[in-house]
Amino acid sequence: MRTYLERDLQDLAAISSLPDFRRLMQAACLRLGQLLNQTELGRDVALPQPTVHRWLNLLETTYLLVRLPADAGVARAELGYWRTTIGEEVDFVIEAGGKLLPIEVKASASPRLADCAHLRSFRAEYGNKARAGLLLHTGSSVEWLTADVLAAPWWRVI
């Protein structure tokens, strides 16, 4: 981390305050897998939004951050995620051949029926456009949790 902050990053941009940049990195890491509001992130680390925007772009340029676009139902993306206003979310949505594949990832070896609730909500919203949901887990079994959600170990799929 020290090499990145003190040498590599300085080759790309003159960061005036490395402690502030490190604090932003840590705060961004705490939002892993969530929506990222740059103004809110800036407020949390006491930095102006333009600085947060510039530094997040640097993190993305140096491959320490990857942003996924949202699939809002109108905009199309090859890889995105889905989130409703009431907080339901699906980790990944892959669009291929005019169909949407919703994927949920769980750090559990034994997926449960409750784990596929958001996948089923996604399928209900998108209807025939959505393929059966895929729930990736850390276990070893491949099984249909419901008629429209397949649970499989992540290491067998990737």
Image (cartoon, rainbow, N blue to C red):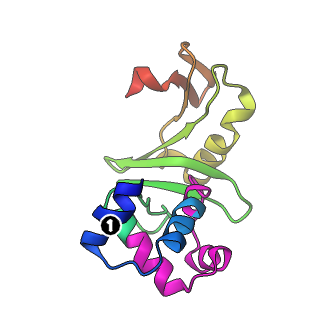
| Percent position of residue 32, x then y | 56, 53
Residue 45 seen in the figure: yes
Question: Which of 15 and 149 lies nearest the eye of the viewer?
Answer: 15
For the point 37% across and 28% down, which residue is it? 158
| Percent position of residue 48, x then y | 56, 86
Magenta region, residue range: 28-57
Q: Would you name the residue on which mark 1 appears? A: 9
Residue 61 seen in the figure: no
Question: Which of 143 and 63 lies nearest the eye of the viewer?
Answer: 63
Q: Residues within 10 Å of mark 1 (few under 14, many from 20)?
A: some
For the point 32% across and 67% down, which residue is it? 9
For the point 60% across and 78% down, which residue is it? 42
Question: Which of 25 and 104 lies nearest the eye of the viewer?
Answer: 25
| Percent position of residue 86, x then y | 74, 61
The amino acid marked with disc number 1 is: Leu
- Give the prevailing secondary structure in the magenta stretch: helix
Is residue 49 magenta-colored? yes
| Percent position of residue 65, x then y | 41, 58
Seen as rendered, the residue at the extreme top is 141
- Say which element carries label 1: helix
Is residue 63 magenta-colored? no
The image shows a total of numbered marks equal to: 1
For the point 61% across and 42% down, which residue is it? 119
Question: Which of 89 and 1 lies nearest the eye of the viewer?
Answer: 1
Seen as rendered, the residue at the extreme left is 11
